[in-house]
Image (tube, helix red, strand yellow):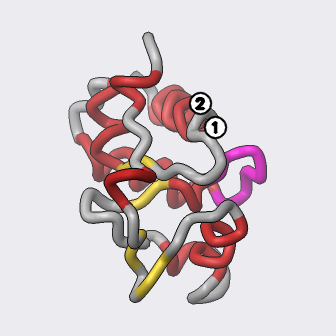
């Protein structure tokens, strides 16, 4: 799979994460069966910030931590975007992570 193709596959999954929900790098990697896993999804997300159609703020690490927040132009922008959707964040972590978690392997079919 070419780099561009898997980036687009990742973006397509991220576009489907509902407002007010979050998913993880690993959940996307499992759904897409990506060999390099969560790291590969992270690369795609890092490159997505020129794509306003990709809600990158909805992707967090496996613990619900806003690990990609430094790619949003300001240290608080990712949190602000999540809170605007009703997601509670404290100390850079989704406070109700288990209830907000959206897993594409349960919600989507390939």
Q: Position of residue 65 (x, y in %)?
A: 35, 71
Tell me the magenta residue range. Answer: 49-55
Circle 2 crowding by C-alpha within 10 Å: few under 14, some 14–19, many from 20: few
Task: Say if the magenta span includes residue 58.
Answer: no
Residue 88 sits above or below residue 19 on the image: below
User: Where residue 15 is drawn, which disc sits there?
Assistant: 1
Regarding mark 2 in the picture, which secondary structure is present there? Answer: helix
Q: Position of residue 25 (x, y in %)?
A: 35, 49
| Label 1 with label 2: CB-CB less than 8 Å | yes
Residue depicted at 29% across the width and 52% down the height: 39
Q: Quadrant of residue 15?
A: top right
Q: How many marks?
A: 2
Residue depicted at 43% across the width and 41% down the height: 102
Mainly helix, strand or loop, the magenta region? Answer: loop
Residue 59 sits above or below residue 102 on the image: below
Residue depicted at 52% across the width and 28% down the height: 9
Regarding mark 1 in the picture, which secondary structure is present there? Answer: helix
User: Where residue 12 is drawn, which disc sits there?
Assistant: 2
């Amino acid at each position: 799979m070419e780099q561009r193709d898997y980036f687009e596959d990742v973006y397509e999954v991220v576009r489907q994460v509902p407002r007010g929900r979050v998913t993880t790098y690993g959940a996307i990697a499992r759904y897409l069966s990506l060999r390099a896993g969560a790291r590969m999804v992270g690369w795609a997300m890092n490159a997505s910030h020129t794509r306003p159609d990709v809600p990158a703020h909805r992707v967090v690490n496996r613990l619900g931590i806003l690990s990609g927040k430094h790619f949003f132009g300001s240290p608080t922008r990712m949190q602000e975007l999540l809170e605007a959707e009703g997601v509670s964040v404290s100390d850079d972590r989704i406070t109700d992570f288990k209830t907000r978690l959206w897993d594409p392997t349960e919600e989507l079919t390939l």
